[in-house]
Image: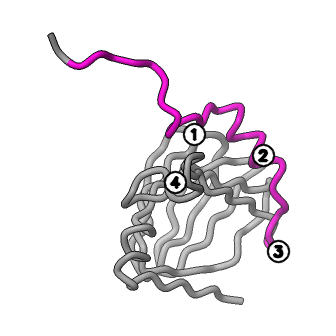
Amino acid sequence: PGIPHTSYSPIFPYSGANSVAALGAMPAAADGARTPRHTNPANGGAVRSLMDFYLKGLQPNAETGPYRTTSNAACLVVEGDGVSTIGAEAISWQEYDVFTLPTWQWVLHKAIARDTRLFQVTDRKVLRRLDLLRDEFGD
């Protein structure tokens, strides 16, 4: 009767503690942000065949460098608060908010007052497979 349920999957071993540890162990980019990619431990590739998952760590009062990409992203604010400038729009966000980053818009994020973490789900993997992924970084 039915498919047996299991509470463990080797594809998804990403506890909050492990993700935060990976974030802390990663060297910071020039703008101070850290963005480890979650990977499938069996093959080192994407966790899901068509999606990529990232945890972006932002330092207090620091602003990321501007970037744009052909990929889309949904962002969940795990901790902290800040402002993202997306194209000509500035949006404020706080813990537990969800917002999106549309394709080919200049984006920058700024954390306010404390360390901040954004969980991002993107379609980078599918665009990479279709040879449609393009990234550009501003000054």
Which numbered dot is residue 114?
Answer: 2
Measured Cα–Cα span from mark 1 to mark 2: 12 Å
Residue at image position (78%, 40%) is 21
Read off the residue under disc 4.
53
The answer to which of 94 and 129 lies nearer the viewer is: 129
Name the kind of residue labelled 3 in the image: Ala
Q: Amino acid at mark 4?
A: Phe
Majority secondary structure in the magenta region = loop
- Tell me where the magenta segment starts and ends, as one range: 3-31
Nearer mark to the viewer, of 2 and 3:
3
- Rounded to the nearest whole Å, what is the CA distance between mark 4 and mark 2? 23 Å
Q: Give whichever of discs 4 and 1 has the lower sequence position.
A: 4
Question: Which amino acid does the dot numbered 2 rest on?
Answer: Arg
Left/right placement of residue 3 relative to residue 106 reads left
Based on the picture, tell me whether residue 51 belongs to the magenta stretch: no
x, y percent for residue 2: 17, 16
- For the residues labelled 1 and 3, say whether their Cβ atoms are less than 8 Å apart: no
